[in-house]
Amino acid sequence: MQLTGASGLSLSALVAWVAATGGLDSTGFLVCALNAAFFGCGILYVKSRIRARLAHRRPEAGAMAGVTITFHVAVVMFALVLVWRGWIAPLVVVPFVLAAVRAKWGLSTKQKWLPLPRLGWSEVALSLVFAALLILGFRR
C-alpha cells in the first residue's frame, strides 16, 4: 500500500511539469516515473532497515534486504538506460546511485539499535538532493 501511495503522490510531479511547461508530454510522464522509482526505493529501504532490526527475533524478517538491494540496482540500471538513450541528463542518476550505496551500506551494518529520527532525516536529505538534481537535470 505504501508503494501504491508513493506512486500516486508521484503524480504531483506530472502536475508540476504541466504547470511549469504549460503542456502534457512524455517528459512529464518520465519525471513522474523517476519520482515513483526514487521514492519506492526509499520506502523499501526504510522497511528493510526496520525488518533487519527485527531479524534477531524473527529470522524471516531479514529476507527483505535482498529484494531491496535488487530493486535499487534495477532502478539504477533503468536510469542508466535513460541516460544512454539521451532522455535524461547523467546528473539525474546521481541520487539513485547514492540511494543504492546507502541501502547496501545500511543493510550490511549490524547495529544493535535503529535510530529512527536519523533514518527519517537521511531520507529527507536524500529527497532534497534528488529534487535539486532532477530540476537541474531537466533545465533546458
Image: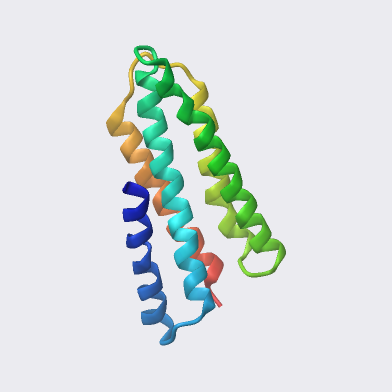
Q: Is any part of residue 74 visible from this angle?
A: yes
**Left or right: 49 as drawn, with respect to 115:** right
Q: Is any part of residue 102 visible from this angle?
A: no
Q: Quadrant of residue 44?
A: top left
In depth, the one of 108 and 137 nearer the eye is 108
Q: Is residue 118 above or below residue 130?
A: above
Q: Quadrant of the C terminus?
A: bottom right
Residue drawn 68% across and 69% down?
A: 86
Q: Is residue 3 above or below residue 107?
A: below
Residue drawn 31% across and 26% down?
A: 115
Residue drawn 45% across and 83% down?
A: 24
Q: Is residue 34 above or below residue 45?
A: below
Q: Quadrant of residue 87?
A: bottom right
From the top left corner, tell me how far across and down residue 43 is, in percent.
38, 43
From the top left corner, tell me how far across and down residue 133 is, in percent.
50, 59
Residue drawn 31% across and 54% down?
A: 5
From the top left corner, tell me how far across and down residue 9 is, in percent.
32, 61
Q: Is residue 31 above or below residue 68?
A: below
From the top left corner, tell me how far across and down residue 35 is, in percent.
44, 59
**Tally of numbered tags:** 0
